[in-house]
Amino acid sequence: MIAQLKYLTGEELRKLFRGGKLKVLLLLSFFIGVLFVFIGVRLGLNDNLPLTAMKLLLAAVLPFFMGSLGSGLMVGECKDGMIKHALKLPISREFLFMGKLLAGWTAAALIVLSMLVPTLIGSLFLQGVPAPSTLGASLAELGGAILFSGLLLVLANSVSLWVGSSGVGLVVSVVLWMAMIVVGLLEPQLNRFFVTNFADWLRPLLNGGDDGTTVSSLLFMAAYYIIGTILGLLAFQRKEF
Amino acid sequence: MFEVDDLTKVYPGGRGIQGLNLTVHSGEVVALLGPNGAGKTTALQVMAGWLATDRGEARWNGASVADRPDLTRPHMGLMIGEPSPYPYCTGYDYLKCYHKLYPGIDEARIRQTLELVGMTKHQHLKIKKYSTGMKQRIELASVLLHRPKLLLLDEPFSGMDIEGKREITMVLRGLVSDSGMSVIVSSHQVHDIEDWITQACIIHEGRHVHTAGAVKIRESFASVEDYYLHHIAQERSGAE
């Protein structure tokens, strides 16, 4: 079963690469990462370039990339009938959904890596080899960024499956995300319930030793992952082709 | 053996298929005949387990197609609706995609299947450059790749030229006679499948009208087309 899921995920990922959108997003991410290094140097961000890059890109760029990738992950194939090839397979629809979602999640991780690795390398050149604790913190933040971006992808996929269109799904996802930012700014105590704030979820643990905040954020993130996956699966099961 | 028992799927608005019963044995070719919008594609989609039924079920050797895709799909080849192969990959890559989920598919099988449907020459061309007939052929290749025991085909010859129709009919006939494969094929062009079928099932406005064996049809009618036209005319006059 695990081997079958791994194979299915690999095939779906290969399909995503062939589609072109993922290639464009990866290239764009890489160039944004490189550009950030040059801009960061000019702005004097040499001290903590990877962390600053992560914070800014997670707040401003990656959500749109994840929205774009997530909203077209399944609903596009459903709409143009290409999903029929996968529906012929000797696997259940739930299994197919999980394979596609894992492939999307892996693609999201690759986008985050292609955007943030240049900043890590850039900081190595600018500052030399950092202390192990700084490097560890950067890598932990990178892991957090991947989890956060993956969550946005899962939610965007679920929204687009329910609305039945990748374009409308992207718009609805972005509007929801912006609404959460606005509500979070007006009512800061609600901020911890929103996916917009998870970009910071590791920082309290890494910098202040406040593991309670991190754990509660982690629980919210897990809850969002579960809800997003279940809602997406329900919409995928209800689809008629 | 493939059994369809009281299969019913009605869409909001009333269209769909109601109370379809069918039994298909090894080596049989059943034609689902009916005018446009009669419910043939819906019937095939429900048989394939792609659509949830309102009532009844389809079974392959006793296992429900909808509930046990792991047991039933390895034996089924499904070509339903417009062929929509991935446009950005080549015909060869399309056949290779997911191939490990079926047992016994290797490079040799892929090449053999491409040859079977006459696509060897175009296998490395991107599918977006294919004509409708070529897309139909590559879709058929993907369906035949795992050598199914039952084929569900929906208008398999649409978009194909006369030569292509004849070629593909010969291939399918060969598979039926050599391997005992069963076929359920829908068409509104009766003459395309006239001399190939062993049983005909007429559907009209979502209702199962009549089923008869090819031998019996030829005893009473000059052709399957006449049999079809006779029953459809009866249905229409009954409705008036």
Image (cartoon, coloured by chain):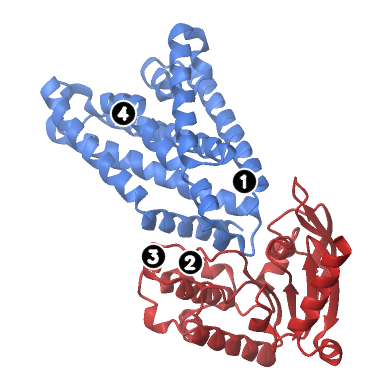
Chain colours: A blue, B red
Q: Residues within 10 Å of mark 2 (few under 14, many from 20)?
A: some
Give the residue type at disc 3. Lys
Chain for numbered disc 4: A
The label number, if any, that marks residue B53 in the structure image: none
- Picture quadrant of residue A143: top left
Q: Residues within 10 Å of mark 4 (few under 14, many from 20)?
A: many
Query: How far is disc 4 from disc 1 in space, using C-alphas?
Result: 31 Å
Tell me which numbered mark, 2 or 3, is placed earlier along the sequence: 2
Query: Which residue bears the numbered disc 3?
Result: B128
Tell me which residue sits at (34%, 38%) in the image.
Answer: A112
Query: How far is disc 2 from disc 3 in space, using C-alphas?
Result: 16 Å
Tell me which residue sits at (78%, 90%) in the image.
Answer: B222
Pointer 2 and pointer 1: residues touching (CB < 8 Å)?
Answer: no
Query: Which residue bears the numbered disc 2?
Result: B97
Give the residue type at disc 4. Leu
- Would you place residue A2 above or below residue B131 in this image? above
| Percent coordinates x, y for residue B104 in the rendering | 57, 78
The label number, if any, that marks residue A236 in the structure image: 1
Q: Nearer the viewer, mark 2 or mark 1?
A: 1
- Would you place residue B25 above or below residue A85 in this image? below
Q: How many marks?
A: 4
Chain for numbered disc 1: A
